[in-house]
Image (cartoon, rainbow, N blue to C red):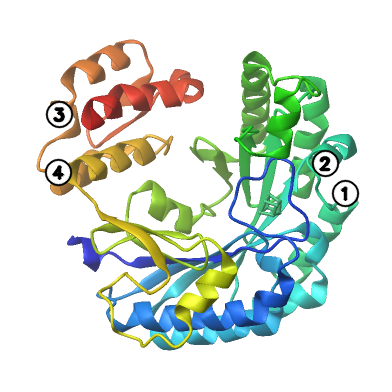
Amino acid sequence: MQFDEAPLSIYLHIPFCHVRCGYCAFNTYTDLDDLIPAYVNALRHELEIIAANNPHQETHTLYFGGGTPSLLTAHQFERLLLTISREFKLSDDMEISLEANPDDLSFEYLRDLRALGCNRLSIGMQSANADILHLYDRRHDLQKVSDAVAAARKAQFENLNLDVIFGAPGEALADWRPTVDALMAFAPDHVSMYGLELKGGTDLRQRVDRGELPRPDDDVFADMYEYAAEVFERHGYVQYEISNWRRDAKQCRHNLQYWRNLPYIGLGAGAHGFAGGLRYSTITAPQRYIAALADSAAGALEFPLTPAVAKHRVVSRADDLYETIMMGLRLTREGINRSRFSARFGQDFVAMFPEAVERLGALGLIHVGEDRVRLGSAGRLLSNGIIREFVDGIMA
Ligand code: SF4
């Protein structure tokens, strides 16, 4: 398949939050809610510009991420969705996902979103432990998550994800188990579980660096991950990515687009995209993003560029290989599809990396099948190192 024949995915970034969480390094802003109406208009204009030269026949996933998309009203979602359905050809089984904070989710709001076509909801639960939620500066408690899940089910959301984070400073395995139990009691269709990353500039990182909080321990991290993975499996969840589990066929199709290194456009302040042979990122500050889109004519730039794009670069073969391997090996069941890899790069994956494949295969860290190369179960906790074995040579 030619690259621009693949169905497209669309990501819309909503960079507004009421409070900045202690671990958050995303492009998001507090106290800018007043900008939301102008921001929604700018997003609609950016959608029109990008659609004018879009070569993709069809769009099959749409993802509202943030920030906090649930700060938008149902009417603002409606205006965005009307623009998208007018400007893009949407597939019949379109996945429309929305990230949400539990305390924004009333039944009436969710019912309206569902009626607009949103069919996948991702709620940031993060922890069941009140002290850890406080440490993270989250606004909600466990009861709020319970209420949000009940409201989502009543509103007919049949594809519900819960996000959790393990490895808070001072969190022990015994503290983590009740979060896993509470998560399973909510019976979501999908679970995303991430180890806490202490990114530079975040409040938690600074507190750990100053010695006010203990530095998380790698061995405890590994125990928490393995414990939760076993519990998820016992409850019928299937792992399909290093940090993601699904029930039934409820994998996140939008994120699969990233992991398969397929094209997506990113709109909004501080969004990233990969389409038309380019990787690009947009202006980060919402005020400057809105200003860049004011009065600009549609169709003046080549797809996927818009006046809001701050940086872009042509994707070289080495970049493309790097992304395909790095993302593909995260897919624990699917891995790197050897026939798709050969069609894209003109050479079989195993023939391209014979020594690394043999060495890592002998150690059980990767599994080489006739049509795929994926991590072995022993390799899941060592995925970063294994991925580096392949990609370091490419970028050298
Ligand atoms: S809600 Fe999400 S985006 Fe907003 S501050 Fe917290 S982690 Fe960051």
Q: Which residue position holds label 3?
A: 352
Could you tell whether 20 is left or right of 158 in the image?
A: right
**Badge 2 residue CB within 8 Å of ligand 1:** no
Q: Which residue position holds label 1?
A: 141
x, y percentage for residue 201?
63, 38
Q: Residues within 10 Å of mark 4 (few under 14, many from 20)?
A: some
- Which image quarter: residue 309? bottom left
x, y percentage for residue 277?
23, 59
Disc 3 residue type (three-letter): Met
Q: Residues within 10 Å of mark 1 (few under 14, many from 20)?
A: some
Q: Nearer the viewer, residue 314 or 294?
A: 294
Q: Nearer the viewer, mark 3 or mark 2?
A: 2
Quadrant occupied by the N terminus: bottom left
Give the structural element (helix, strand or loop) at label 4. Answer: helix
Which of the two labelled residues, at mark 4 and mark 2, occupies the earlier sequence position?
Answer: 2
Q: CA distance from mark 3 to mark 4?
A: 10 Å
Q: CA distance from mark 3 to mark 2?
A: 46 Å
Disc 4 residue type (three-letter): Phe
Q: Which residue position holds label 2?
A: 133
Above or below — where is 76 with respect to 151? below
- Looking at the image, which residue is at 54% across and 54% down? 250
**Badge 3 residue CB within 8 Å of ligand 1:** no
Which of the two labelled residues, at mark 3 and mark 4, occupies the earlier sequence position?
Answer: 4
Which of the two labelled residues, at mark 1 and mark 3, occupies the earlier sequence position?
Answer: 1
